[in-house]
Each structure stands twice: as C-alpha cells, then as structure tokens.
Image: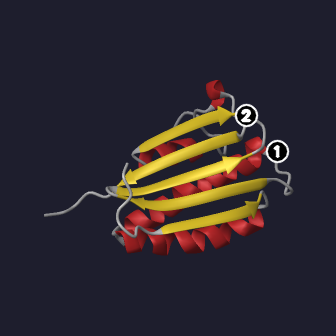
Amino acid sequence: MADTPHGLQMKFAMPSDPRYLPVVRGAIGPLAAAVGWDETDCRAITLALDEALANVIRHAYHNRPDGLIELECRECADGLEITLMDQGDAPDRSKICARQIGCDQPGGLGTHIIKDVMDDVSYEVSPGGNRFVARKRLRKTT
C-alpha cells in the first residue's frame, strides 16, 4: 500500500500495562475520524485495536507490565494500517482463534471483533519480535 502524500501517522511506545490502554483509545478514534470514518466505524476500529493490545498484554507478556509494545498507525492510500510490535512470547498460530460465538464462558471474542472490523489481519514472528498488522479500507461513498 502506498502512502498518501503527507499521510497521517501516529506512533506510541507503551509498557504492557493495561492502564495505558485508555490513552491509545483516546487517540485512535480521532485519528480514524481524520482519515474519514464515521463515529460508528471509529468506535469499532478503536475496539479492535484495544482488543489486539489486550491480547499482546495477556498472551505475549502474560500480564507482566514491564514489556514494550510499539504501535504505529498510518494513513494509507486506501485507509489505515495499524502495526503492533512486541518482544513477548510468540503467538501459537494454532491458538489464534476465537471461542465459539454463543459459548457461555467469558472472554475469547477479541479475535472475532478484530477480524470483523478490520479488512486484513496478519501475524508475523521473526527474530526481531512479534508483528501484528491490521488494515482497514475506507470505502468511498458516491
């Protein structure tokens, strides 16, 4: 995806501490609005990012607050790309799936939310760390 000229870009480096999640939530909604989404989509994008960050905190860092999460949100020619990098435990691809919808146990819906809201989602593991990339295309109304 090519960048738009002077595209919006936001970067955070945050501890793997959930108390910082409201800061990111407070920034991503207005960023998504500036790119062009309506309030409903902005809330959905914010929720998807919040779920992805919570998954990194819970699964990569096992709720330890001393890890580092790097977040980059950037405007692309057709929408928004969100990248999370961490140095925690690599995700087990066989376990990156949500629980069944309608199941009575709590939790496990984050993956459904992320995949429902975002258009493309990928996970990469490298010697440099774990990388989660999610893209949301802005659909132009005519």
Q: CA distance from mark 2 to mark 1?
A: 19 Å
The image quadrant where one finds the C terminus is bottom left
- As rendered, which of 70 and 66 lies closer to the eye? 70
Secondary structure of the residue carrying numbered label 2:
loop
In the visual, does 137 lie left or right of 48? left
Image x and y of residue 114, in percent: 51, 47
Looking at the picture, the colour scheme in use is: secondary structure
In percent of the image, x 58 and y 47: which residue is there? 110
**Between residues 21 and 12, which one lies in front from this camera angle?**
12
Residue ID at (66%, 49%): 85
The residue indicated by pointer 1 is 62
Q: Disc 2 or 1, which lies upstream in sequence?
A: 1
Furthest residue in direction top, as rendered: 94
Of the residues shown, which amino acid type is indicated by label 1?
His
Q: Secondary structure at mark 1?
A: loop
Query: Label 2: how many residues lie within 10 Å, few (<14), some (14-19) or many (20+)?
Result: few
Say above or below: 54 vs 97: below
Residue in view at x 39 percent, y 63 percent:
41
- Dot 1 surroundings within 10 Å: few (below 14), some, or many (20 or more)? some
Residue hosting label 2: 127
